[in-house]
């Protein structure tokens, strides 16, 4: 039975090297995959090598780590079910505002992930002519301009009217985005939250915490290779927001 652990360990390491080659070492949170492989290896060794002959202390260590390992698997499964449920929540309902959440900007240019969000916004805006568009995101490390300003310019270049776009250019994360937007518009407004598909569930939870009771998700596509890394990263995002009482 312990040999089953070798499969996720191998898959994690292979995927890590794929991400490393594909996106480079600066790709966020890819360190999780060798860490997952290490957890599997430790569990494999404990199950394989620890027997009653080694003494009660080693048995306690093995049982404690196994309980910790199983709890981690259950936690991962629960959060991933939540994440996946948001990835398919696309709705064509009419709304008052479409909130496009920011993402990394490389100098003055939107990253690949941000372009996918903005292209989805253009498509949504064409189908819902009456909704206002809120672009949100401040200036992060390595960025020459605030994300919201880069997003506005991209949307205007794609044919979206400038007077239809509302700018929030101070937020440093999703929580701050909704906190600041809640001060700009009526919380009873019906909003569409447009972000990368893996990010929708957490975004909706954060928006509801700020008092937006009527919100729908509009998921944009994600990179086909890095999507699994993003989905695992969302668990860390959820744990952070829960620990800070943001959701």
Image (cartoon, rainbow, N blue to C red):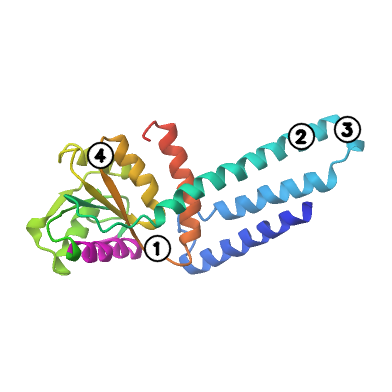
**Marks 3/2: CA–CA distance:** 10 Å
Q: Is residue 132 above or below residue 186?
A: below
Q: Nearer the viewer, residue 40 or 196?
A: 196
Relative to 209, is 233 above or below? below
Relative placement, left or right, of 18 versus 200 is right
Q: Which residue is mark 4?
A: 212
Camera-nearest residue between 229 and 200: 200
Q: Are marks 2 and 4 in contact (CB under 8 Å)?
A: no
Mark 3 neighbour density, 10 Å: few (under 14) some (14–19) many (20 or more): few
Name the residue beneath numbered marker 3: 55
Residue for badge 1: 222
Q: Secondary structure at mark 1?
A: loop
Answer whether labels 1 and 2 touch (C-beta < 8 Å). no
Residue placed most toward the observer, 177 or 29: 177
Which of the two marks, 2 or 4, is nearer to us in this view?
4
Whole-number angstrom distance, CA of label 3 to CA of label 1 = 50 Å
């Amino acid at each position: 039975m312990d040999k089953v652990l070798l499969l996720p360990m191998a898959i994690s390491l292979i995927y890590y090297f794929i991400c490393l080659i594909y996106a480079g070492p600066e790709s966020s949170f890819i360190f999780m995959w060798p860490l997952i492989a290490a957890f599997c290896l430790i569990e494999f060794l404990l199950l394989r090598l620890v027997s009653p002959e080694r003494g009660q202390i080693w048995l306690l260590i093995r049982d404690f780590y196994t309980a910790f390992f199983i709890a981690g698997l259950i936690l991962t499964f629960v959060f991933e079910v939540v994440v996946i449920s948001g990835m398919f929540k696309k709705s064509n309902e009419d709304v008052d505002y479409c909130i496009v959440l920011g993402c990394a900007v490389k100098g003055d240019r939107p990253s690949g992930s941000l372009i996918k969000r903005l292209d989805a916004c253009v498509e949504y805006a064409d189908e819902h002519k009456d909704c206002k568009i809120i672009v949100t995101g401040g200036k992060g490390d390595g960025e020459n301009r605030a994300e919201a300003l880069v997003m506005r310019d991209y949307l205007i270049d794609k044919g979206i009217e400038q007077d239809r776009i509302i700018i929030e250019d101070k937020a440093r994360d999703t929580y701050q985005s909704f906190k600041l937007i809640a001060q700009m518009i009526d919380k009873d407004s019906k909003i569409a939250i447009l972000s990368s598909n893996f990010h929708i569930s957490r975004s909706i939870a954060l928006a509801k915490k700020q008092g937006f009771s009527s919100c729908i998700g509009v998921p944009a596509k994600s990179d086909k290779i890095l999507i699994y890394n993003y989905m695992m990263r969302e668990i860390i995002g959820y744990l952070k927001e829960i620990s800070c009482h943001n959701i």
